[in-house]
Amino acid sequence: MNPANVAELVRKNFRNLIRSKIGSLVVILGPLIVIFLAGLAFDNSNVYAVKVGAFRPDNVDVTEKMVDQLRTQFKVTEYTTEKECLDAVRASEVNTCLVFAPQFKVGVRPQNQLVFYVDYSRVNLVYALVRLMSEEIGEESLAASQDLTRVLISTLDFTQGEVRKQRDLVTQLTTENDLAARQVQDLLAEWGDMDLGFNEDGFSVDELASAKTQVKQWSDAALSIGGRGLSKATSFIDAANALVKSSGASQGTQDSLLAAFKKSVEEIGQLQDDFAKTENLTRESFVRFDAQIAKTIGAIEDTKSKLSSADTSREFSIRVLNSIQVLLDKSLVSVLSVQHSLNQIDGRISAIEITDPEAIAQPIVTSIRPVVQERSYLNYLFPVLSVLILMFTALLITPTLILLERNGPASFRSFMTPVGHGAVVFSHFLTAFIILAVQMVIVLGVVSVFFGSEIVSNVPAAVLVLSLISALFVLIGMILGFLFRHEETATLAGVMVGALFLFVSDVIVPLESMPEIFAYIAGFNPYVLGSQLLRKVLLFDAPLVSVLPDVLVVAGYILALSFIVTGVYQATRRESLRQLLDDIRPYTAKLRFKKK
Amino acid sequence: MEETLQEHVRLQGRQGRSQKDVQRLLEEAGWPKEVVAKYVAESFKDLPKGALISAHAVTKAFGQNQVLRGVDLEIQRGEIFGLIGVSGAGKTTLLGAMVGFIRPDAGDILVGLPDGSSVSVQKSPERVKRLVGFSTQTPSFYPKLTVRENISHFAKLYGLADADIQRKGAALMELVGLGAARDVQAFRLSGGMQKRLDIACALVHDPELLILDEPTADLDPILRKQLWELIRKINAKGTTILLASHFLAEIELLCSRIAILQQGRVVEMGTADELRGIYSKNYEIFIQTRRKDYRALLAKGRKYFFRVEEDDGELVVQTPFPERVLSLVADVVSRGDLVSLHISRPTLGRVFEAVVKR
């Protein structure tokens, strides 16, 4: 293969292409138009012009509010019956129909039912609608939920306040209860220690009475002895007096004796008087003593009785106190339990970290964010779109180039030149490849300039991947170009192959939603391979090393397709099949001979 | 003077004339016999020997349709060789086989090399392509490219150096008369100019053999004549030409030898005179009168007529006695009744028709 020949053929192809106005327009404007339209269509994340039908059986404020809310985003048409609304969806007058439950009420089943009907035949719209409606209705639902949560939270706050207040009281009650229990215990101890037993030994009434009697006896005896002593003393004095008088003692002595006697008699008389008085007093005192003793005995008896009674009371009290103590203990346990419960309630309430009603109503805020921070869908769609452009351009332009050359007026002249088949085939490949490269440059330029997207950050990887994808589809296009004889059939085949790749891909239906075997097969779809590879490189800035397996798969495809292209070219060349058969005839003849 | 003579002799030799013929012609032209003998001998010494291209029992069938049935043909260097045949006779198939575009089922086509050896078209197609140029009935070039671009494109594919391409391109454009249209896109050229461009493209690599397939089809008489002149000029430069055409007049006019292809076989081959001789030695007299009543003439001249036909009011008489027939016409045709009277040897067309009918 002479490179100069290849270069000349490619140059010639481009001259032809550039001078063909329509061809140039297709090459330059085709991708521009596609990307411009795609850019306009996907340059934002909104779904425009969604028409919403609504049926409200009852004119409830909340439904009116919701419908008004929807009106801020969409064109809303209200219908008087549910059937009208559904018919409007079927007739594509509206994209979705919202049907409110009768007497719609937030948070009350089944009055809180809101059904929206969508036309699932419009696959590409339905998911957007479901998402949009879910978002819009979800906001309303969330608001209602937040209101309800707010009530719950305020109640909970109040409960916690009350619990905290009551918990203090309970604590005080616990303390008091404890104190009371201890006091009761002390009391019990006191009362337990209290001896209200009457020691009759200490208060021997009989002995007292006996002693009293004895004292009286002894007193009476003493008084009697004293009286008798005094009488005897008088008698003795009288006798002494008589004796004195009779003694003959001097008068003076007598007189002195007698005077002394007399004085003694007088003193004895006094003593007798005193004695008599004392006796009287004693008697009186004794009477009083006796009375007092009697009283004392009575008092003792009374005290005894009282002590007995008090002891009975004490015992009763102890029993009562014991009961009180048991009750207090139980009460304390209960109070402690209440306190524990209150603490737990308080703890639990305090442990509620999320007290924001909005956060409780929507504990997880499900905002879907791009893994790549970009502002429009164009960025997400760009890899798919790029591969789509590459695929269709390659599948349409490559066969066209080949067939234009093959069926063109210069085909015979080209045949007459001594240019090798390799150069011819490679020039087709190179021409189509360069066209795709130009288109990609245009597309990238337009996207970067007009839509302000930084699509490519990893330029070498992107160039490599785009080149591989382009080569892959160019080779497929070349097979079509060599297989078919007419541009029309080749174009049709290109469209069909492209459509096949497109349908057996995740563009229309996600691979994950396909049957497993189908998804597995679709995984080998060059379009899927290419778009996934490009997405990794463009969107996720995946380094080449991480996408190396995918790159190798695509490279394997390219290698295999190169062989197929060569084979198809050889097989479909005029006369070449016959030539091939002629060439191998000697070998087949040898084989036949050997068999014989 | 001597150089001119030598070049002239070489040209004659390249055009296929034999050494004896050239020597005789020069002697008749008044050149001294010794000088002529010397230069003719020297000039013919270096000329390539043998046929330039020869087909040997070439057969080809497309399915059940046997197109070529053992074609044997030899084209000598320097000649303009004519190939005629009805549609479907196998002309284009044979031409295609001669350049390897069609692979024969059997037989071989050999292209002679200057050293006297030859190569098979089937075995060495690339080498043959460098020796043969082919201009098809429908011009074969890129319509969107200019005249210059077309020529230089094909020249590059033949491996010519840039300087040679410039030089060769200019010379070719001059040769075919497209110098003024060098930067005009090919599709804007007239039919004749397109044909000339096609021939120029076929000549970019200085082929030894130029095959022209219906070169003047769809051209008006003036353009046709211009092209004939071009063919002569190309041949005069030493290029052997194989001309396949339906226009028997141009074959007759241009070709030194002619082959008639009929049902895949070469049924006749020779010079125009030889072919005419094969067909008839009679003259043809074309008579047309106003009254278109030739009964009297036919009655009187029956004994002189070899064959009589009446075609669209014109009487065509073949006769070995033209003078007598003309005398008879003068006697029979009344004054003022004669519209046209034309006498000629049978045209190649007549020969061809006869061969075809045979």
Image (cartoon, rainbow, N blue to C red):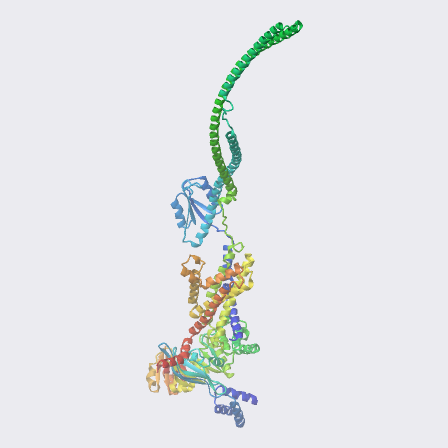
- Closer to the camera in the image, A29 or A82: A82
Question: Relative to the observer, which residue lies in front, A224 or B33?
Answer: A224
| Image vertical order of residue A349 relative to residue A372, above or below | above
Compared with residue A397, is residue A164 higher up or lower down, i.e. above or below? above
Q: Is residue B286 visible?
A: no
Please state the horizontal and vertical placement of residue A513, each as a whole percent of the image: 42, 56
State left or right for residue B88 relative to residue A224: left
Q: In which quarter of the image is residue A502?
A: bottom left
Q: Residue lying farthest bottom? A: B34
Residue at the extreme right of the image, as rendered: A252
What's the residue at 39%, 50% (across, down)?
A90
Q: In which quarter of the image is the N terminus of chain B?
A: bottom right
Position of A347 with respect to A516 (left or right) is right
Residue A482 x/y as whole percent: 44, 70
- Where residue B86 sits, quadrant-wise, is bottom left
Q: From the viewer's side, name the closer residue of A152 and A207.
A: A207
Percent across and percent down for residue B220 are 46, 75
Q: Check the picture and name the quadrant holding the C terminus of chain B.
A: bottom left
Q: Position of residue B119 (x, y in %)?
A: 46, 84
Question: What is the count of numbered marks?
Answer: 0
Drawn side of residue B70 relative to residue B187, left or right: left
Any part of residue A319 in sight: yes
Residue placed most toward the observer, A78 or A422: A422
